[in-house]
Amino acid sequence: MTTSDFLIIGGGIAGISAAARLSELGSVTLLEQEPVLAHHASSRSAALYEPHYGNPAVVELSLASGDFYRAGVGLLSPRGLLLVGAAEEAAVAAEEAVSMSLDPITPDEARAIVPILNDRIVFAAHGVHAWDIDTDLLIQGFLRQAKARGARVEVSSPVTALSFADGLWRAETPTGSFAAPVVVNAAGPWVDQVAALAGLSPLGFTPLRRSMARIPAPGGLDVSAWPMIFSAAETWYAKPDAGALIVSPADEHPVPPQDAWADDMVLAEGLARYEEMVTESVSRVLANWAGLRTFAPDRVPVIGFAPGVPGFFWLAGQGGYGFQTAPAASQLAADLIGGRRPELKTDLIASLSPARFG
């Protein structure tokens, strides 16, 4: 049996960033069920850092991650954000523009930025405070930090049993037995299943499928400088990607934890909503995929020790905001586990705690 100070279950951005932070405090073992790290939601993210996007707790975590991102060479590159709405969506779009700190612009100004927008656009708002995240660079940076301090990473190691005895959590996997006094549940869509293995009641996390289609650049245009485009009420969004355009129907379909795939009908409906607002029809789809965005019942991340359960720590429910919140979320996790005073506000920490579920 391999014994460490900290045992992390889950090798997505949450688990990898936690491994880097916790490796400053002691020995770390990270267990990932897939043959590679960051296989599920972390490899299928829209990869945008827009710190005003999300509910208040997410926004605070995102803003608190800003210094980390700005200090990292190459982690961010300018993208910008454009919100658009048709006549029936104008009121909703105006509210969203305020909440996301976007500046209203005219439809003609919007078309000067994204020339394929059609005359159904009656409301538009723009902001430059959105950046692409180099997710691979971020993941590899955290991973190098962890490994440089001796962290052990075990892939193809799904946890089949998890028990607590004599002050240690013991995880059984096909690759061996691993133990630590603290276990971090960062298993993404599988966090409730991991909790059940440990004898805890599930908190009610729901994985929601999000589908994506990659289409050729509309009209053969150079889309590289286009911002990310959100429709009002987020019924679709589009983002430039390596000379092409990623379009999502922004779907949220509850599914069991799984290696998700896109639903053809959902994609078709989302692409139709996108086509209603642009001058160029979608002639073909280059590729499609889906990821899972996992939320707690109140859609607020869960970060903290399980009440009354020694050494069981939740790092879960990041939803679609895992990358943009990871620097602050992982630092909070390390501070709480290490018994240090976090820099984040007390009311934010309380809002993230699993104690809120009673």
Image (cartoon, helix red, strand yellow):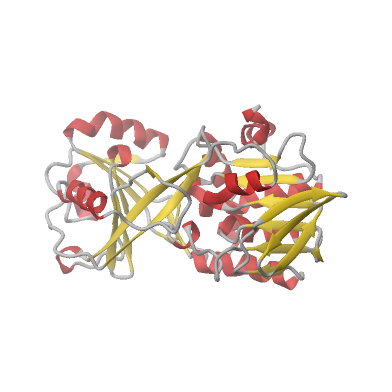
Do we see residue 355 in this rendering?
yes
Where residue 211 appears, as percent x and y from the top left, is: 33, 53
Image quadrant where one finds the N terminus: bottom right
Indicate left or right for 20 with 291 as reference.
Answer: right
Image quadrant where one finds the C terminus: top right
Q: Toward which corner of the image does residue 200 lie, by quadrant?
A: top right
Where residue 131 appears, as percent x and y from the top left, is: 44, 56
Indicate left or right for 59 with 170 as reference.
Answer: left
Of residue 106 and residue 253, the one placed in the foreground of this image is: 253
Residue at 71% across, 71% down:
147
Indicate left or right for 127 with 105 as reference.
Answer: right
Indicate left or right for 329 with 94 as reference.
Answer: right
Q: Toward which corner of the image does residue 121 lie, by quadrant?
A: top left
Farthest residue to the right: give it: 166
Residue at 68% across, 54% down:
161
Q: Is residue 40 above or below residue 315?
A: below
Where residue 227 appears, as percent x and y from the top left, is: 32, 55
Where residue 60 appears, as percent x and y from the top left, is: 56, 40
Do we see residue 51 in this rendering?
no
Residue at 25% across, 68% down:
286
Question: Total of numbered circles in the picture?
Answer: 0
Q: Is residue 269 above or below residue 11?
A: above
